[in-house]
Amino acid sequence: MFLDNNKYSKEKSRERCMNYWNPSRTQYWYDEGIGIMIGRREGYYFWDLDGKKYMNLHLNGGTFNLGHRNKEVLERLYEASREFDIGNHHFGSVTRGYLAEKLVKLSTKGMQYAIFSSCGGEAVDVAIKTVRYATKRRKIVSLEKCYHGHTGLALNTGDPFFKDPFLCGEGDEDFVQVPMNDMNAMEAVLKKEDVAGVIIETVPATYGFKIPESGYLKGVKKLCEKYGTLYIADETQTGMMRSGTLWAISLEGVDPDVIVCGKGLSGGIYPMSATIMTKEAGKWVEEIGRLHTSTFGGSELGCAVAGKVLDITTRESTAANVSMLTKYMKEHFDKLKMKYPNFFTDYTQRGLIIGLSFHVKDGGRKMMRALAEHGVWAINARFDEYVLQFIPGLLCTKEYCDELFEKLEKSMVDVLEREEMRK
């Protein structure tokens, strides 16, 4: 093995992370009672170094859509590694052209170019640079309680929670936020005709996977067209078939000017993201293409891997499985909602993008802890204390769901009993 489990024990790993990596992040999860150090991983399960088995219902925001260490994806990596490596970022290549064409042809109407990065935040940076060059404007509009990445420009589009500690965005009038579903607030900003782009995560994750009101995103796109602004659909978490179609924005009847794709594109094997754009939006690609580069963005190995990920993701059998899981899980959620109506009060679902609402103070966090005790890893929503994010994999089975719902109900009972004891 690459790592000797005796040498790299859980306690030793924790000590090293505390001393040399990220002590506050490491300690946070121990304080939450979820001090996981992942060892073995397979399919939609992973094992802590102490041997405890977990169902993965977070998937790193969809990174592991196809499961941990998907055999077909690994085989593509092994095959490509016989001939390719990172490649040279100055030149085009076989795999870059192959993946770019594949993404463009699988994307919404009018797309022409795909530029590669190594993470979603970097791809958002590219999207912002893209719309600024195309419009010759600076201002970027995003939604309140949103998150689009931790890199430079992307960080400025996010909630103050993420950027204020790093002294980003304060007094910067180029980045504006408006409330979701408030069309008047959006138009009030856009009608000044100085906005380069509006960026919206199709189903905002940090906000608890709240689904925008019917017609809202389509209305925003029409406002963009009216005032000369470009629309960026952030599909980093919502894309790659999670909604039941490759891009969640397609369900809204919107053809964006730019799509940001990441996480699941990697197959959980090789860091990959992409910024896909129309010919009009992508003027810089034609005119000043050498002025943007990324050493590892568009790695030739990564492009080969992402191509296989797209093959698996767009299979009829995958789409059929997502449809089956969507209905099967809805049936189970409805039963639990009827059984515990004063606790499990509501849920949002767009395919396999799911937010569960629990009506107790800090309900999402309490359910996260209870589920971890029963061997399920899911995470609470950052900006809605009642919501727990649920992100099941595209290739899950009914048997997996049955195991999951048994543990979900046990966790609900545990939280209810603890709440009763507090009274």
Image (cartoon, rainbow, N blue to C red):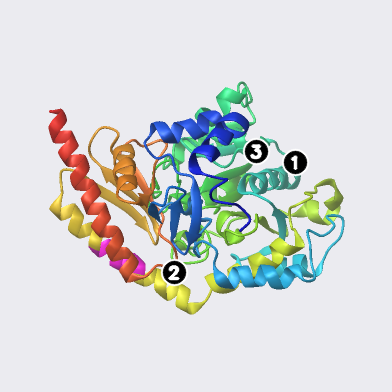
Of labels 1 and 3, the one closer to you: 3
Tell me the mark number nearer the camera, choosing from 3 and 2: 2
The residue wearing badge 1 is 136
At horizontal 48% and vertical 67% (from top left) the residue drawn is 245
Q: Residue furthest bottom?
A: 316
Looking at the image, is mark 3 or mark 2 earlier in the sequence?
Answer: 3
Instruction: Decide which of tag 1 and tag 2 comes sooner along the chain.
Output: 1
Identity of the residue furthest to the front in this view? 6
Alpha carbon of mark 3 to alpha carbon of mark 2: how far? 31 Å
Q: Is residue 313 left or right of residue 123?
A: left
User: What is the quadrant of residue 31 in the picture?
Assistant: top left
Crowd tier of the residue under label 1, counting other residues whose Cα lies within 10 Å: few below 14, some 14–19, many 20 or above = few
Which residue was labeled with disc 2? 395
Label 3, on which residue? 151
Q: In this image, 395 relative to 87: left or right?
A: left
Q: Which sits in the foreground, 144 or 403?
A: 403
Find residue 400 and report its image quarter. bottom left
Q: Residues within 10 Å of mark 2 (few under 14, many from 20)?
A: many
Asked if residue 320 lies in the magenta stretch, the reply is no
Q: Position of residue 140 (x, y in %)?
A: 62, 38
- Of the 4 image quadrants, the one containing the N terminus is bottom right
